[in-house]
Amino acid sequence: MNTDIKFAILDNSAKSLNDVKNLLELCNLQLDSNIDLFVVAYANKNQIIASTGLYHNIIKCIAIDPKYRGENLSNQLLNEIINYAADKGIFHLFLYTKPENIRIFNECGFYPLVVVPDLATLMENTPVGIAHYCKELSNNQHSGKKIGSIVMNANPFTLGHQYLVEFAAKECDWLYIFVVSEENSLFSFKDRFNLVQAGTAKIANVSVLSSSEYIVSQATFPNYFLKEKADIEHANTGIDLLLFRNYIAPSLNITHRFVGTEPFSPITNKYNQGMKYWLNQYQTMTPKIDLIEIERKHTNGVAISATAVRRLLNENKINEIKELVPETTWNFLQNNYVKNTERYYENR
């Protein structure tokens, strides 16, 4: 090991990001916009020769200057950032890399979860992390030949969501609803989860569950080492859906996944099409999952969406929201948004 090499933590200042960006470009990588901080290695006092970034519990942007490869810098960098994360109370870490680098990071204590051939792999720093999660998940298991699933953000829960749940529940012996747990929405996870529970409470064969960190969020995807937009979308969708098919679905014997048609967002619509491939057509060791896509519920000729509810809320067109949401969501909005807004204007 070169003893002149020193390690440091960089903030997200423009200069720091520019220095790291130059190294990443030298390594044919891109600067990821979702990074909390970088750990870098310096040589010759000011020259950055290696870097890795941390975003929550995701390690990204690992790069070594080609002239310094073979110096065991990957292991050193990972140790530095793992120790930093531990100081912050973060012990469960994920890492994205290209499939050809699996061996390198396996030797550093990371284990592959899923691989999208030739594009990307997701690894975690424990050999039993997802196994423990799936064992806990299996405690919710219900018997039946046709077990359905829905993954929804429900931001907030609308009559469209309720229609999809009612349709799927009638088709299945049991239905699992995974509410996206990531806090990246107008409504908190706690509120969204409670709204889904309240809006489905009268349906007997439904369980509402948290999605967990194994249902990957958009913020964690590996777009920094994929330059072609089509490759990024393919890898994003593949990682998310292979985690679901290979681990989550078997733990609950899920045979079907239900989605509504997507008339507004081309990205979501393309994701729905990708689901057919990764859940049913892609060859892997786990059973196929049938995707059932049903037409969205409409009102006045327009598909109901949570986006429309949030837009009306922002425009203070409260009365127009009532026909888009169940009574349970309407009561929540009345108590938490409408009355707060009224009180705000009364006190001005």
Image: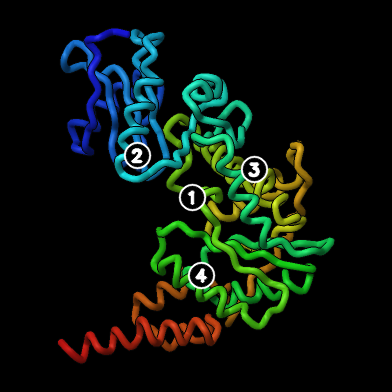
Could you say which is closer to the camera, residue 299 or residue 54? 54
Q: Residues within 10 Å of mark 3 (few under 14, many from 20)?
A: many
Q: Are marks 4 and 2 in contact (CB under 8 Å)?
A: no
Camera-near label (1 vs 2) is 2
The amino acid sitting under disc 2 is Ala
Quadrant location of residue 177? Answer: bottom right
Q: Residue at x 66, y 72 (%)?
A: 165
Above-or-below relation of 273 to 299: above
Q: Are marks 1 and 2 in contact (CB under 8 Å)?
A: no
Quadrant location of residue 167? Answer: bottom right
Camera-near label (4 vs 1) is 4
Mark sitting earlier along the chain (3/1): 1
Q: Residue at x 40, y 73 (%)?
A: 311
Mark sitting earlier along the chain (4/1): 4
Camera-near label (4 vs 2) is 2
Q: Residues within 10 Å of mark 2 (few under 14, many from 20)?
A: few
